[in-house]
């Protein structure tokens, strides 16, 4: 009887662990300058960022883009990339907005289009602007 219970416990643990191992989250350090891989990935996402901003009523330019986290879901074959940008008017004039976007990037059926999973924005003051742009490009 003990062998059956232990076997069931081990089997259950393996199933739970394998499900957990298929989804991973990686956070990007925000107190360091972006590495070359992050900069290249953000450049590729540039048109998707502008499209998401315009679709959500933020008809502004942006800079100081940073990836905050990436979630990999191997079971459903997609990534969720959360990033932030600073929206501004004209030649880096106020009002400044902190914009967070989470894109869902599909795997197998990739059509060249990333879907917006979540979008939020809020106005920021000059102090917040200095802190958020301290370690950006």
Image: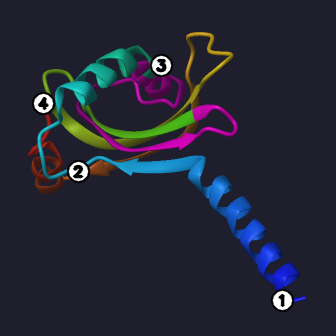
- For the residues labelled 4 and 2, the Cα–Cα distance comes to 14 Å
The residue where tag 3 is placed is 51
- For the residues labelled 3 and 4, the Cα–Cα distance comes to 21 Å
The N terminus sits in image quarter: bottom right
Label 2 crowd bin: few (<14), some (14–19), many (20+), radius 10 Å: few
Instruction: Answer whether labels 3 and 1 touch (C-beta < 8 Å).
Output: no
Closer to the eye: label 2 or 1: 1
Q: Residue at x 46, y 50 (%)?
A: 25
Instruction: Determine whether the residue tagged by mark 2 lies in a helix, strand or loop.
Output: loop
Q: Which residues are magenta?
A: 49-78
- For the residues labelled 2 and 3, the Cα–Cα distance comes to 26 Å
Was residue 53 drawn as part of the magenta stretch in this picture? yes
In the drawing, what numbered circle is on residue 2?
1
In the drawing, what numbered circle is on residue 29?
2
Pinpoint residue 36: horizontal percent, then vertical percent.
18, 25
Dot placed on the residue nearer the N-terminal end, 2 or 1: 1
Pinpoint residue 10: horizontal percent, then vertical percent.
72, 72
Q: Residue at x 47, y 22 (%)?
A: 54
Label 4 crowd bin: few (<14), some (14–19), many (20+), radius 10 Å: few
Q: Residue at x 61, y 38 (%)?
A: 74
Residue 137: image quadrant is: top left
Closer to the eye: label 2 or 3: 2
Please, is residue 86 above or below residue 5 in the view? above
Dot placed on the residue nearer the N-terminal end, 1 or 4: 1
The residue where tag 4 is placed is 137
Closer to the eye: label 3 or 4: 4
């Amino acid at each position: 009887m003990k062998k059956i219970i232990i076997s069931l416990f081990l089997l259950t643990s393996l199933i739970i662990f394998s499900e957990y191992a298929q989804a991973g989250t990686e956070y990007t350090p925000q107190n360091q300058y972006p590495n070359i891989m992050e900069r290249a990935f953000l450049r590729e996402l540039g048109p998707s960022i502008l499209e998401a901003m315009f679709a959500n009523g933020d008809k502004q330019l942006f800079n100081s883009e940073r990836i905050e986290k990436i979630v990999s879901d191997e079971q459903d074959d997609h990534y969720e990339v959360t990033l932030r940008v600073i929206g501004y008017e004209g030649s880096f004039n106020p009002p400044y907005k902190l914009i967070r976007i989470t894109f869902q990037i599909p795997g197998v059926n990739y059509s060249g289009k990333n879907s917006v999973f979540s979008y939020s924005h809020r106005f920021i003051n000059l102090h917040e602007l200095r802190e958020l742009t301290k370690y950006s490009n």
